[in-house]
Image: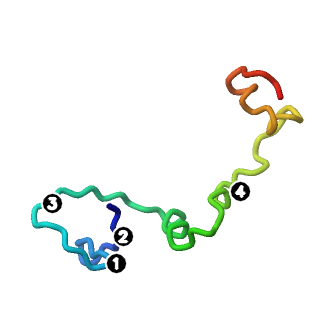
Amino acid sequence: MTYRGRIQAGAIVLDEPSELPEGARVRCVLMLETQDAQAQNPNRPSHVGLLKFAGIVKDSPPDAARNLDRYLYGRRKQ
């Protein structure tokens, strides 16, 4: 199960109440703001965060997008 929450006064406070057993082992993963925004708005396309990288590759072949696997892994050209 996944629970969401925030840090308050050095402790994790869950957004929704839950009955976790005393002594249960848990794993905490720090969510970056972009991950948190995606979680709050699941209808937002996941590629939106990648747009900041658009256009930074220079001198690529004109068909690089279509044949990316060919250039990366040597696969057959489409």
Going from the N terminus, do you reach mark 2 or mark 3 first?
2
Left or right: 37, with 20 as reference point: right
Going from the N terminus, do you reach mark 4 or mark 1 first?
1
Disc 2, SS? loop
Task: Residue at 18%, 68% (x, y): give it.
Answer: 20
Residue occupied by mark 2: 4
Distance in Å between CA atoms under marks 2 and 3: 16 Å
**Which corner quadrant holds the C terminus?**
top right
Residue occupied by mark 4: 51
Mark 2 and mark 3 residues within 8 Å of each other at the beta carbon:
no
Disc 2 packing (10 Å; few <14; some 14–19; many ≥20): some
Mark 2 and mark 1 residues within 8 Å of each other at the beta carbon:
yes
* Mark whose residue sits in front, 3 or 4: 3
Distance in Å between CA atoms under marks 3 and 1: 18 Å
Q: How far across and how far down the image is residue 1, in percent?
A: 32, 61
Task: Residue at 68%, 23% (x, y): give it.
Answer: 73
Disc 1, SS? loop
Task: Residue at 54%, 64% (x, y): give it.
Answer: 34
Q: How far across and how far down the image is residue 30, in percent?
A: 38, 60
Question: Which kind of residue does numbered mark 3 sit on?
Answer: Ala
Q: Residue 54 shows which numbered tag?
A: none
Question: Which kind of residue does numbered mark 4 sit on?
Answer: Leu
Q: How far across and how far down the image is residue 15, in percent?
A: 34, 78
Question: Which kind of residue does numbered mark 1 sit on?
Answer: Asp
Task: Residue at 69%, 27% (x, y): give it.
Answer: 72
Q: Residue 24 shows which numbered tag?
A: 3
Distance in Å between CA atoms under marks 2 and 1: 6 Å
Res 77 quadrant in image? top right
Whether 77 is drawn above or below 64: the answer is above
Residue occupied by mark 1: 15
Disc 3 packing (10 Å; few <14; some 14–19; many ≥20): few
Disc 3, SS? loop
